[in-house]
Amino acid sequence: MASVVETYLHRIQSACTPMDAGTLADYIPQLAAVDPDRFGVSVVVHDGHVYSVGDSTIEFTIQSISKALTYALALRERGFDDVDAQIGVEPSGEAFNEISVDHRTRRPRNPMINAGAITATALLLQRPHDDEGTRDDSGTAVDEAFALILEFYSGCAGRHLTMDDEVYRSEMATGSRNRAIAYMLESFGVFPSDPEAAVDLYVRQCSVTVTSDDLAAIGSTLANGGVNPRTGRRMLDTAVTRRVLSVMTTCGMYDGAGDWVTTVGLPAKSGVGGGILAVLPGQLGIGVYSPRLDEHGNSVRGVEACRHLSDDLGLHMFNVA
Ligand code: GLN
C-alpha cells in the first residue's frame, strides 16, 4: 500500500506532469536525445527512508549539480583558507557559463558558476604539500582526482556511481567556452593547475550519472550535517556542509536564484541534465528529474515540484510557525 508520503508525491506528479514548457539542453547531441517527458521525484527523510514516484531510477548526467559537491570536496581536502583564496562566495546573477570574475580580486565570484567550479577542480589537482607550487597535471593526476570525486559522490549517494563516457567525449569536443574560462583564469597568474587538466576533470564530474533517488540521498547527506543517513558514513564535517548549503542558497539556481529563494526557500542546485537537488537542513533531501529547462537552465517541472513541496509542507526555511 502506498504511504501517505507517496500518495502526496503522486499528487505533485499529477499537478506538474501537464507542464510541458521549456526545452531540452541541446549543446551536445546526448542531452538533446533524452525523452523529454521523463519525470521523477524523490525524497529521502532523516532516517534514510526513500519515498519516490515516477522515473526515479532513470539515470541522467548530474551536470552542474556536481559543482556543489566538488566545492564541498575541495573544502574538505584543501581547507577553507586555500579554497577561499581562489573562489568567492558572492552571487553573480549571471548565467552559469558567463566568462566572469570579481574585478577587484580576480577570483571567480562563486563556485556555482563554471569559472568557480573549474577552479574547484583545479584545486583538487594541485598537490597540497608542494611548497614550490609545482604542478602535476599528468593524466594520472586527473584520473586520481576523478577517482576521489567519484568515491565522494558515491559515498554521499550511498551507491557506486559511474560516468557516461559518451557525454564526456561530446562535452570535451565542444568545450571551447570552458577552456576559455580556464585559460582566462590562468592568465591572472594564480590558477592552481593546468587549465586543460582542470577542464577535463570538470567535464568528467559533469558526466557522472545519477537518478532522482540519488540526488535525494545526496541531499539527505547534506541535510544531515554531512553524514549519509542510510549508511551512517560521515562524508563532510558540519562546517563544510554549512558553507556548501549557504552557497547553494544564494547561488545554486544560477540567475534564477533570487526567485528561487523567495518562492521555494531551500538550498538547491540544478543541472542542465534536468536534475534539481534541494535540501531542508536537519530534515530531508529532495531530488527531481525532468529534462525540459527554463531560460535559466533549471528544470521547469523540477522547479514547480519543489515549489509545491515547499508550499504544501511549509518547507521554506524562513517560515515562522
Ligand atoms: N557541462 C555543462 C557546462 O559546463 C554543465 C552546465 C550546467 O549544468 N549548467 O557547460
Image (tube, grey):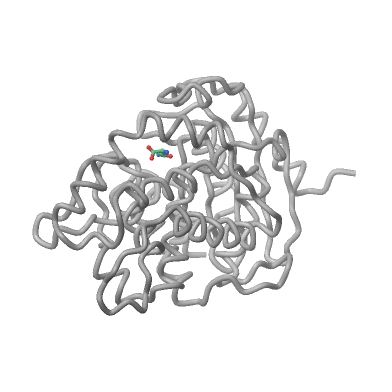
| Residue 281 drawn at (x, y percent) | 54, 65
Tell me the quarter of the picture where residue 165 sits: top right
Q: Residue at x 58, y 70 (%)?
A: 235
| Residue 296 drawn at (x, y percent) | 36, 34
| Residue 158 drawn at (x, y percent) | 69, 59
Q: Residue at x 54, y 62 (%)?
A: 148
Tell me the quarter of the picture where residue 154 sits: bottom right
Q: Of residues 134 and 61, which is closer to you in this image?
A: 134
Point out the residue furthest to the left here: 104
Q: Of residues 146 and 274, which is closer to you in this image?
A: 146
Point out the residue furthest to the right here: 1
Q: Residue at x 77, y 41 (%)?
A: 7
Quarter holding the N terminus is top right
| Residue 167 drawn at (x, y percent) | 52, 33
Q: Is 298 placed left or right of 109 in the picture?
A: right
Up-down relation of residue 211 to residue 281 (above or below): above
Q: Of residues 167 and 231, which is closer to you in this image?
A: 167
Image quadrant of ligand 1 equals top left
Q: Is 49 placed left or right of 27 in the picture?
A: right
Up-down relation of residue 116 to residue 272 (above or below): below
Q: Residue at x 38, y 76 (%)?
A: 79
